[in-house]
């Protein structure tokens, strides 16, 4: 298949608004992410860099490191705790061992629409989770969107759970994701994102799941002929700062980073949603065979996954699940 990425045009970066923030000292932020330079996440980071550098009048410099070059989501988060890296924006899923409540976002089909995820993340529940995650050497200052995950594979079209029988699927390092694919009949393996392209290329795994924009920006379509629009999980990104770095920052700059993180999150969601359909089309044009499921077909997956809700209820906390379900 051809690469689709050449066709993707990013929306322009918005202008920076807000006054210059004056405070003492000069600072440098190394900001690392797992996804590549051509993804929506990176575009968001470029906006963050622009806001922070302009509004600090150059006293805070931001250097961006995409494509897991400084480590995958977990390694980058550990580097923040050690104080060797200043910022990262992982998916919540690989951090569940550290923050068990994040597992709620791994429940399948929790948010039928992205606006429903926004309402929860930008509301009281999301704020409480940011506060809780501001511990263990980390300060959590905002949310972003990884997005709805879609299945790709190298073997055959997947239209119903039975088609997954025996397929080797790479998942994020997350027990609930493993449970989802096992329950559906596949053969899941947790693996760092940094190793994924090679594993797909060499046939170590048959498939993986990620949002369209990540499938395209990571060129998975070059090694995966089939995709299914499952929308099975909506994954948020969380913006994290090293507490060691944070504690050295004047309060004015801490506030600037918080503002910039909120603006980055909003803009990055906008980019991700604007590009989603176009990228799906680009992937089709590149030769990928994409199965779009009917509501009846989606229901087959949902019904099969209902036990996952029951099994994880105690672990995550029934009240939290009910609170979210009441809002969506
Ligand atoms: O599949 C993953 O590991 C994640 O979705 C990614 C692409 C690293 C973003 O956090």
Image (tube, grey):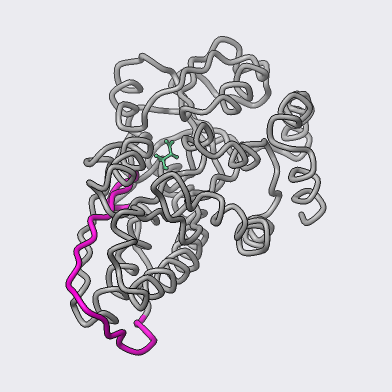
Magenta part of the chain: 15-38
Give residue 312's quadrant in the image: top right
Image location (x, y in percent) of residue 194: 30, 32
Q: Quadrant of the C terminus?
A: bottom right
Image location (x, y in percent) of residue 213: 43, 48
Q: Residue furthest bottom?
A: 19
Give the vertical position of 147 relative to 19 (above or below): above
Quarter of image, ligand 1: top left
Q: Residue at x 44, y 18 (%)?
A: 206
Image location (x, y in percent) of residue 106: 61, 37
Please give left or right for residue 227 compared with residue 223 in the image.
Answer: right
Please give left or right for residue 146 compared with residue 34 in the image.
Answer: right
Indicate yes or no whether the magenta region holds residue 61.
Answer: no
Query: Most prominent secondary structure in the magenta stretch?
Result: loop
Indicate yes or no whether the magenta region holds residue 24.
Answer: yes
Give the vertical position of 223 relative to 141 (above or below): above
Give the camera-side residue of 137 and 154. Answer: 137
Q: Residue at x 25, y 49 (%)?
A: 85
Image location (x, y in percent) of residue 92: 51, 43
């Amino acid at each position: 298949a051809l690469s689709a990425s050449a066709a993707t045009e990013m929306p322009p970066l918005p202008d920076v608004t807000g006054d210059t923030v004056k405070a003492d000292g000069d600072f440098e932020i190394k900001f690392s992410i797992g996804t590549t330079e051509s993804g929506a996440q990176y575009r968001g980071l470029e906006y963050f860099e622009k806001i922070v550098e302009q509004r600090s009048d150059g006293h805070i410099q931001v250097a961006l490191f995409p494509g897991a070059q400084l480590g995958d989501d977990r390694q980058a988060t550990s580097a923040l705790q050690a104080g060797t890296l200043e910022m990262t924006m992982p998916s919540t899923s690989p951090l569940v061992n550290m923050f068990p409540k994040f597992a709620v976002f791994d429940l399948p089909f929790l948010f039928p629409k992205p606006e429903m995820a926004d309402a929860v993340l930008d509301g009281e529940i999301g704020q409480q989770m940011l506060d809780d995650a501001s511990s263990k050497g980390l300060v959590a200052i905002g949310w972003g969107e990884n997005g709805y995950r879609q299945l790709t594979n190298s073997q055959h079209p997947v239209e119903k759970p039975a088609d997954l029988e025996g397929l080797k699927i790479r998942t994020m390092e997350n027990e609930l994701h493993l449970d989802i694919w096992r329950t559906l009949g596949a053969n899941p393996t947790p693996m760092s994102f940094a190793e994924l392209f090679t594993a797909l290329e060499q046939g170590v795994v048959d498939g993986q799941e990620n949002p369209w924009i990540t499938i395209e920006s990571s060129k998975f379509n070059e090694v995966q002929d089939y995709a299914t629009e499952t929308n099975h999980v909506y994954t948020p990104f969380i913006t994290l700062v090293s507490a060691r770095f944070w504690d050295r920052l004047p309060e004015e700059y801490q506030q600037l980073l918080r503002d910039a993180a909120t603006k980055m999150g909003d803009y990055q969601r906008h980019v991700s949603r604007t590009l989603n359909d176009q990228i799906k089309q680009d992937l089709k044009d590149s030769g990928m065979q994409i199965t779009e499921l009917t509501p009846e077909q989606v229901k087959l997956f949902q019904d099969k996954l209902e036990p996952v809700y029951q099994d994880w209820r105690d672990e995550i906390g029934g009240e939290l699940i009910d609170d979210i379900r009441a809002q969506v």
